[in-house]
Image (spheres, rainbow, N blue to C red):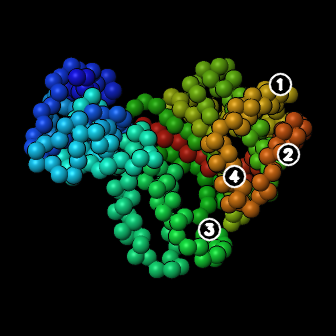
């Protein structure tokens, strides 16, 4: 049979497809024809050697924990399962070898697969499902009115917790956001950090503050971000040959109050830090004074139009959009105005946005430099 194995710790390159014998069935085990296997972060962490104190270093070894399949043969002492049963389960975490045509499992490692769940979905349920069950045991002890925060709710475990909490009776309490005053500090801040031996520096320039939160302003900020990034790529990377790939990012939030962060980041040689920061700030100053070049604004508009034609067809976009609109108490049909706003943004609009949001009154300059000892 075919089986994925590796003979040393490392990246994906250590994996190989091997021909091995079908494992023998013992009286308390079952032989399973594997139909589907899922891959967990734990699998590659073990393969990389990050957990070798627990997994040991015996080679060659298999990989894979979650699986689903059909019982081929059951041992004489097996009472719960028989040939032909559709099952799913978890193998020993540090001895996983589910990425194979056939595997051996004990009765406690498997369960009957629900008939309404396909093999591929069942193979992705065992590890996250068992983890979620452990958390459920804690959640069901909570009292009415207890607030619960699920950190990482879009992951496998988080999504199962979401479904569980969503099944509970609704109290119809509407919670309000609370201002905790956790924001980037105000004023002008400059900080150099000397760490590491590599002769390379990382620069981050951050503008932040309160904003008038609206769909129109968010679109204009994105246009300003792209126009500035185009200029930084042209000047810092191509004209001055000082950086490889400068980037510009923008983040906004509506509650508890409208706020934004606008960040420029790039890596460069330590001796070029001051020169390239000056060049970046000069491009920001040009935006404040004259706005972007019309050709760069048109380029952003064309790229955004092409991108939107693709993302509007994805479930991910609509799930994120609807969630954001509900959380921000924004109309669900706001997307209908997007094209009109985008197509009517002018150079003058971006100039005004830059003057307002990139004034430099709240500005952070962070530079990572090599350790002075090196």
Point out the image quarter for the C terminus: top left
Residue position marked by numbered label 3 in the rendering: 181
- Position of residue 286 measured from the top left corner of the image (x, y, whole percent): 80, 35
Residue at the image position 80 percent from the left and 54 percent from the top: 214
Q: Is residue 23 left or right of residue 299?
A: left
Residue position marked by numbered label 1 in the rendering: 295
Residue at the image position 61 percent from the left and 61 percent from the top: 183
Residue position marked by numbered label 2 in the rendering: 337
**Marks 1 and 4 close (CB-CB < 8 Å):** no
Vertically, is 50 above or below 303?
A: below
Depth-wise, is mark 1 or mark 4 nearer the camera? 4
Rounded to the nearest whole Å, what is the CA distance between mark 1 and mark 4? 33 Å
Look at the image and tell me whether residue 177 can be seen: yes
**Marks 1 and 2 close (CB-CB < 8 Å):** no
Rounded to the nearest whole Å, what is the CA distance between mark 3 and mark 4? 27 Å
Mark earlier in primary sequence (1, 2)? 1
SS of the residue under disc 1: helix
SS of the residue under disc 2: helix
**Neighbourhood count class around disc 1 (C-alpha, 10 Å): few under 14, some 14–19, many 20 upward:** few
Residue closest to the eye, 82 or 10: 82
Look at the image and tell me whether residue 9 can be seen: no
Rounded to the nearest whole Å, what is the CA distance between mark 2 and mark 4? 15 Å
**Marks 2 and 3 close (CB-CB < 8 Å):** no
Residue at the image position 43 percent from the left and 54 percent from the top: 157
Q: Is residue 318 left or right of residue 212?
A: left
Mark earlier in primary sequence (3, 4)? 3
- Position of residue 220 measured from the top left corner of the image (x, y, whole percent): 80, 43
- Position of residue 353 measured from the top left corner of the image (x, y, whole percent): 82, 46
Picture quadrant of residue 235 = top right
Residue position marked by numbered label 4 in the rendering: 322
Rounded to the nearest whole Å, what is the CA distance between mark 2 and mark 3? 32 Å
SS of the residue under disc 3: loop
């Amino acid at each position: 049979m075919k089986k994925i194995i590796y003979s040393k710790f490392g990246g994906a390159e250590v994996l190989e497809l091997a021909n091995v014998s079908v494992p023998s069935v013992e009286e308390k085990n079952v032989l399973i024809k594997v139909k589907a296997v899922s891959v967990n972060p734990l699998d590659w962490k073990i393969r990389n050697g990050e957990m070798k104190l627990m997994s040991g270093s015996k080679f060659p070894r298999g990989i894979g924990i979650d699986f689903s399949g059909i019982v081929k043969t059951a041992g004489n002492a097996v009472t719960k399962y028989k040939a032909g049963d559709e099952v799913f389960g978890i193998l020993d975490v540090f001895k996983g070898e589910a990425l194979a045509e056939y595997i051996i499992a004990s009765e406690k490692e498997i369960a009957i697969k629900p008939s309404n769940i396909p093999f591929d979905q069942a193979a992705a349920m065992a590890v996250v499902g068992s983890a979620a069950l452990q958390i459920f045991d804690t959640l069901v002890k909570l009292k009415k009115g207890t607030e619960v925060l699920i950190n990482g709710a879009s992951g496998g475990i988080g999504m199962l917790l979401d479904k569980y909490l969503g099944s509970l009776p609704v109290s119809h309490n509407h919670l309000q956001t609370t201002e905790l005053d956790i924001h980037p500090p105000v004023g002008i801040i400059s900080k150099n950090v000397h760490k590491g031996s590599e002769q390379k520096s990382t620069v981050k320039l951050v503008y932040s503050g309160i904003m008038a939160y609206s769909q129109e302003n968010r679109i204009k900020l994105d246009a300003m971000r792209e126009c500035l990034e185009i200029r930084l790529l042209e000047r810092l990377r191509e004209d001055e040959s000082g950086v490889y790939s400068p980037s510009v990012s923008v983040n906004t939030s509506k509650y508890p109050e409208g706020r934004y962060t606008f960040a420029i980041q790039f890596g460069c040689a330590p001796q070029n830090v001051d020169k390239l920061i000056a060049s970046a700030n000069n491009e920001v100053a040009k935006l404040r004074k004259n706005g972007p070049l019309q050709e760069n604004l048109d380029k952003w508009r064309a790229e955004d139009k092409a991108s939107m034609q693709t993302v509007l067809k994805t479930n991910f976009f609509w799930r994120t959009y609807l969630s954001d609109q509900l959380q921000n108490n924004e109309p669900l049909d706001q997307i209908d105005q997007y094209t009109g706003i985008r197509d009517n943004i002018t150079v003058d609009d971006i100039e005004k946005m830059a003057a307002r949001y990139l004034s430099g009154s709240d500005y952070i300059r962070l530079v990572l430099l090599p350790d002075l000892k090196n």
